[in-house]
Image (tube, helix red, strand yellow):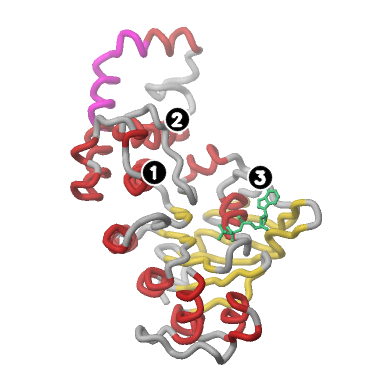
Amino acid sequence: MANQSKKPLLEISGLTRRFGGLTAVNGLSLAVGEGELVSVIGPNGAGKTTLFNLIAGLDTPDAGSVAFDGRDVTGFTAERLAGLGLARTFQHGRVFGNLSVLDNVLVGAHTRLRAVRPGGPLGVPVLGPLVELALALIRPASVRAEEERLRAEAAEIVALFGERLTPRLDKPAHSLSYANRRRVEIARALALHPRLLLLDEPTAGMNPTETAEMLEIIRGLKARGLTILLIEHKLDLVMQLSDRVVVMDHGARIAEGLPAAVARDPAVIEAYLGHKAVGAANQDEAGYGEAGAVIRAVQ
Ligand SMILES: Nc1ncnc2c1ncn2[C@@H]1O[C@H](COP(=O)(O)OP(=O)(O)OP(=O)(O)O)[C@@H](O)[C@H]1O
């Protein structure tokens, strides 16, 4: 279990979100240490995406708090959180279809720069829209140099995905395959230079080869020290990547621990298939135990 002794980078406390009579996230507490990879699993409708929305500032909790790097960030907007180093990707992938692959990634870099230089494009105090427009039109050498640097950095991030994206740098995102759009979204999140990356089902819709590639990419990001909170239905991937696994059901945390222990937890098996399943599923070949077999069965 890596880095649990360190101060948590993310600390969620008693987080609750209700939609009418439904409590999608129910008093959830969770801490993620610097450099840790924590996976959130659970049946459909367990509240995983709602949890991500609350952490990333896309939704506001009815109760509870979110602290990032020791600071209470509950209710902060997504843009403000991005500026602090919190990036997320979406379950079905969100890219700007009419922008090229490169420009999509540059959006991430510009979001970061806007946040660290609220004064304007050159970091000078607020200039007003007319001066900003003039700067954009005449593009002084310093602006051109910065753009070049950002483009080089974006191309480097894109290269993490091997030959999947690099030959398509100038292609509009709408012309890409579904898997490539997911990759572009992750590249854009990385261009933010996040301290915490929230990945919502990064391998959804990917075939086994693409899933294996994504696993290696996430492993690489983790090896570079990035803190990651991952929602993932593919248990193989969760088992291989996670320092810890949190299991949600009906908005609450029903189990938490090392991947192998969680997969054998009767409460987890119940959550996936109901009481009848407990004891019915045998140890699977990979040794993940009953929940492994059950979770595979319902995928
Ligand atoms: N905006 C909303 N309005 C009403 N109900 C919502 C809203 N968003 C989510 N819900 C409900 O909250 C519950 C949790 O949904 P959520 O999408 O967070 O689950 P999930 O664990 O991410 O599911 P999946 O694995 O299918 O993506 C579900 O019952 C869902 O229908």
**Residue 74 in picture, x, y percent from top left:** 65, 49
Which residue is farthest right?
Answer: 21
| Picture disc at residue 149 | none
- Specify whether residue 85 is in view: yes
Please, is residue 242 above or below residue 165 in the view? below
Q: How far apart are marks 2 and 3 (CA)?
A: 20 Å
Mark 1: give few (<14), some (14-19) or many (20+) Cα within 10 Å: many
> Observer-nearest residue: 96 or 103?
96
Tell me which corner region of the image, top left, top right, bottom left or bottom right, holds residue 180. top left
Residue 148 belongs to the span the image colors magenta:
yes
User: Is 60 a magenta residue?
Assistant: no
Task: Residue type at mark 2: give it.
Answer: Arg
Q: Which of 152 and 179 is in front in this view?
A: 179
Part of the protein shown in magenta: 135-149
Q: Say whether mark 1 is within 8 Å of ligand 1.
A: no
- Direction from residue 73 to residue 7 in the image, left or right: left
Q: Residue at x 42, y 59 (%)?
A: 227
- Amino acid under disc 3: Gly
Seen in the image, is 67 located left or right of residue 289?
Answer: right
| Mark 2 close to ligand 1, CB under 8 Å | no
Label 2 or label 3, whichever comes before in sequence order: 3
Disc number for residue 114: 2
- Residue 42's spot in the image, x, y percent? 56, 68
Residue assigned mark 3: 75
Spatial CA distance of label 1 from label 2 is 19 Å
Q: Quadrant of ligand 1?
A: bottom right
Distance, label 1 to label 3, CA atoms, is 24 Å
Mark found first going from the N terminus, 1 or 2: 2
Label 1 sits on residue = 185
Say if disc 3 is inside 8 Å of ligand 1: no
Are discs 1 and 3 less than 8 Å apart at CB?
Answer: no
Image quarter of the N terminus: bottom left
